[in-house]
Image (cartoon, helix red, strand yellow):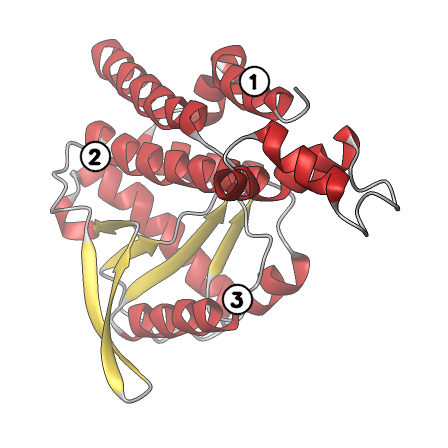
Amino acid sequence: MADIQGGIEKALYALTMEHLAKLADYVPGPVKKRGTRKELLVAYQRDPVFSIFGLDSQEYLGATLAGGTVTSIHRKIGDIYEACVKSILMQALRLSLEQVSYRATLRSGDGDEVRSADAYLQFDRLGKTVRRRVAAFCEAEVARLTSSPNVNLIGVAMEIRHCYQTGDSKRTQADEAMARHLLLSGILPIMPLFCNQSNPGIVNRYRSVWVIKEGIEAYDMVKRFSGFDFMDFLKRNREDFRAPVIALLRSLTK
């Protein structure tokens, strides 16, 4: 068991650092258009509006560059969580990439759209002990949704999000359609949101079709399924994981 835990930790560390390393190559959109940060500031200083109202200042420049940069950071963290959770399930439960994958063709408007789950666990592919544990968890969640559940569950599918802060109507509708498809297929739709900063309006809307596990509950779910303490791993490697992000943010003011 220790060897498996050690192998998971090495894989997760490598995955996380690989994604974070890409932040060093990030160039904010406004700088790309002008060529350099200095040229962008000169353009602001020559502007007949920006130069009057203090928008030619270093402070405003930093704020301008921060918007796209923050979005890029969140995208990369989202990639990390999706890759890490899938890796944990594959290694801890000894499943192949194919076995944790799920794809479906859903009707969207006038056409069809192929959607996939970020991670999938089919009960009959799991070892006996794990199968009982995961199935019991899922049955309890179905019972919370309705007092008279009429669903014969065969598995659980996850839409993995590190956080959910913005609401795009098309994406929301697609997520809701996927959740309905999964439940009709006997698959419990779960959306783990690992942060506590998600948009409450979106989260409350999703609760009607998704089982939402937010903050520490999301980490507990991963541990329940896999036996691996993802939160403990992140805490122990916190300094290594935050350094590339802090370095990028500090570069905005230089």
- Circle 1 Cα neighbour tier, 10 Å, few/some/many (<14 / 14–19 / ≥20): few
Tell me the residue that label 3 is attached to: 168
The answer to which quarter of the image holds residue 89 is top left
Pick the front one: 97 or 168 = 168
> Residue at 22% of width from left, 60% of height from top?
154
Which tag, 2 or 3, sits closer to the chain's start? 2
Pick the front one: 119 or 211 = 119
- Above or below residue 55? Residue 159 is below
Q: As shown in the figure, which amino acid type bears the numbered disc 2?
A: Met
Quadrant the N terminus occupies = top left
Which tag, 2 or 1, sits closer to the chain's start? 2
- Above or below residue 46? Residue 155 is below
Residue 26 x, y percent position in the rendering: 45, 31
Q: Is there CB contact under 8 Å for labels 2 and 1?
A: no
Circle 2 — which element?
A: helix
The answer to which quarter of the image holds residue 19 is top left
Residue 253 x, y percent position in the rendering: 68, 23
35 left or right of 254?
left
Tell me the residue that label 2 is attached to: 90
- Circle 3 Cα neighbour tier, 10 Å, few/some/many (<14 / 14–19 / ≥20): few
Tell me the residue that label 1 is attached to: 247
